[in-house]
Amino acid sequence: MKSALIGLLLAALLQTPFAQRVTGDVSFDQATKLYTYTYQVDFRGFPETGTLIFGLYYHRYLQQTPVAHTEPDDWNMTLGYGGWFSANLHGQSLQWMPNDLQAPRHPTEPTTFSFTTPRAPGTDQVPNFYVYTGLVPNNYPNIVGHVVGPDLFWTPPLPPIPVPEPSSALFLLLGVGALAARAAKGGAVWNRTGCSRTEVI
């Protein structure tokens, strides 16, 4: 219990100077109807080696992969699940980290990450990003905060109900009419002198 409180306290204290180093922007492509979120993270002041993760909560419950993403050459993006706080405890996150955690890092400018998705920006102000080094007690992130990001409650739109084209509907009606005419003709009953019979043609 004591270590958990210390972890939360350190995370809260570290938020003030470092959270301001995470900025975000979003653009919308009218042609593709996709949103691209771009982030700049200033890692100066963080450890130069070891674990370093920038994470952004992507959805609280739904597991889904962005349409596209970018990162520096020596970084990679992975999908993470779960979180530290009730608002994101069962959610999915996008996580960027260096390929080689032991290679010294000497950042001189902010690092840029981005991803593309059909989801519009959210309006809630819950914490949706974190920077994690594994050095805060009880495995808490170094900083958490809020930045522009996709709606965490977004659900995929329902597929449209297919509507037959006019030509398809016309052929369908003609086919039904032809079948009805044939059925009426085949079931006719007619009489001859001295006999009656049913003839199917």
Image (cartoon, helix red, strand yellow):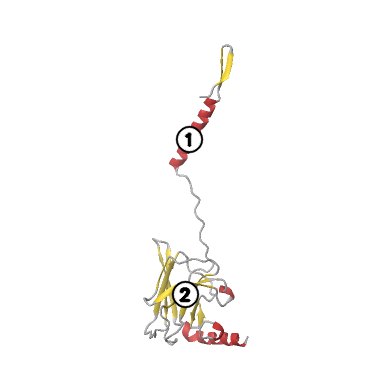
Look at label 2 and name its amino acid.
Gln
The x and y percentages for residue 5 are 60, 86
Q: Which residue is mark 2?
A: 95
Classify 10 Å Cα crowding around label 2: few (below 14), some (14-19), many (20 and above). many
* Residue for point 47% across, 40% down: 169
Q: Quadrant of the N terminus?
A: bottom right
Q: Residue furthest right?
A: 1
Look at label 1 and name its amino acid.
Gly
- First in sequence: mark 2 vs mark 1: 2
Relative to residue 80, is residue 109 depicted above or below? Answer: below
Cα gap from disc 2 to disc 1, whole angstroms: 57 Å
Q: Is residue 184 left or right of residue 118?
A: right
The x and y percentages for residue 47 are 44, 87
Q: Which residue is mark 1?
A: 175
Relative to the observer, which residue lies in front, 81 or 167?
Answer: 81
Please identify the quarter of the rendering in which residue 193 is found.
top right
Residue at disc 1, secondary structure: helix
Q: Residue furthest top?
A: 193
Classify 10 Å Cα crowding around label 1: few (below 14), some (14-19), many (20 and above). few
Q: Is residue 29 left or right of residue 83?
A: left
Relative to residue 196, is residue 124 depicted above or below? Answer: below
* Residue for point 41% across, 80% down: 100
Relative to the observer, which residue lies in front, 92 or 26?
Answer: 92
Relative to residue 130, is residue 92 depicted above or below? Answer: above
